[in-house]
Image: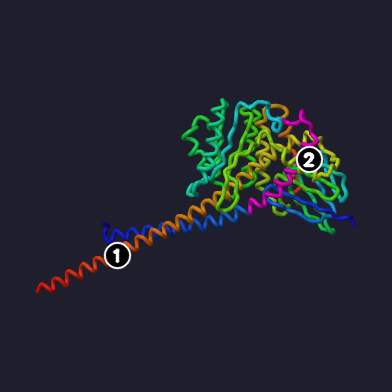
Amino acid sequence: MPSLKDLRNRIASVKATQKITKAMQMVAAAKLRRAQEAAEAARPYAERMGTVLANVTSTVSGTDAPPLMAGTGKDDTHLLVVATAERGLCGGFNSQIAKLAREHARELIANGKQVKILTVGKKGFDILRRDFSDLIIDRVELREVKQIGFANADAIAKKVIGLFDEGQFDVCTLFYSEFKSVISQVPTAQQIIPAAVSEAEEEAEDVAGGAAYDYEPEAAAILADLIPRNIAVQVFRALLENAAGEMGAKMTAMDNATRNAGEMIDKLSITYNRQRQAQITKELIEIISGAEAL
Amino acid sequence: MAQAFKFELVSPERLLVSEEVDHVVIPGTEGEMTVMANHAPIMTNIKPGVITVAREGKEDRYVVFGGFADILPEGCTLLAESAVHVDDIDREDLARRIQEAREDLEDAKDDEARTKAEEFLDQLTTLEGAILPA
């Protein structure tokens, strides 16, 4: 049985923890709003990029398509770009993304493919290092970055495209967490090289309405310029979704932690009060029985 | 008075302009072009430069660093890699980009890459010349 003093200390320390988790929750809520705004601001560009890309691809025939879109024709080496958060304390957010990437990697290896991993964010590197330390070819850390800008995404995309041009891989898949809502983030795998544009293509035919476009320079040249940019846009979107998801997950995790701390404080206070009462009763009995003995 | 049409300037980070304008001057890779209402559908790459947006006798200038224009008779969408209003341009940022372009030029391995880097550097320095005295 802990003494009254121990209990008091314990309650004080849980209270202090609760204050911290509460503060972290509020910070996460504020950051979440900012991250959501950033994600929303980026949406028009991505949407228009999709339609433009679909317009161009519908005019460029299969043989003219640049390798970034058509692929290398092989399927031997896979590059997994795993984007996670920089910090922990956000529930299962990072481990879910890492788990999806790990399963994917295991499956590829089982099928005799070669796997290379590029991690974005410290946590993903920490988790995947345990299983695939020799497969991780590079990592990008965004710890110093306060607000993710397009330049960050562009740098990652350039790195990936550089590796592709060197013939380091055939297929590139991007792992990130899709932001559904504050309480729900869904780990997602998205193939970015060769680019999958079939979905957007159908939509675009309605949008363009069969307008005969002029291209300046010719369509193939535009496409060659457009595809790397589109990859950067997709990486950017993934980073923004991740940023929002991380804050959402952190908010939920910290809310739970605050509530748990509250419950713990209640329990400890009851124990503390009972014990204090027991001690008072004990002292009273001692006094009374002492008086009766006289 | 020219007929107004819908113009949108979008950068990956946000939507900068979305309004009815009289005409827009776009620095295309094949030369500068002025877009007005009912322009034939055209798609063009954009080099780093200044775009001028004119509406009701007022002119606004924006600096873009490469991108893409999608022009339709009913409107024009400009997807810029990065775009800022000419008043907000960060000189240091521009200087940094030029510095990076110079480094790229030095690192260029083959002729094709070198030509490309040279071209880009040239565009940037022209751009610097165009906006610095402003």
Q: Quadrant of residue B58?
A: bottom right
Q: Position of residue A136 (x, y in %)?
A: 53, 32
Taking the view exactly as shown, the residue that stands out farthest to the right is B1
Residue A39 image offset from top left, x and y in percent: 64, 50
Taken as a whole, is the magenta stretch helix, strand or loop? helix
SS of the residue under disc 2: helix
Question: Is A5 on the left or on the right of A266, as rendered?
Answer: left
The stretch in magenta equals: A37-66
Residue at the left extreme? A294
Q: Amino acid at mark 1?
A: Arg
- Residue type highlighted by circle 2: Asn
Q: Nearer the viewer, mark 2 or mark 1?
A: 1
Dot 1 crowding, Cα within 10 Å, few <14, some 14–19, many 20+? few
- The stretch drawn in magenta includes residue A39: yes
User: The N terminus of chain B lies in which quarter of the figure?
Assistant: bottom right
Q: Which residue is mark 2?
A: A55
Q: Does the rendering let one see residue A69?
A: yes
**Within the magenta stretch, is there residue A67?**
no
Q: Residues within 10 Å of mark 2 (few under 14, many from 20)?
A: many
Res A274 label? 1
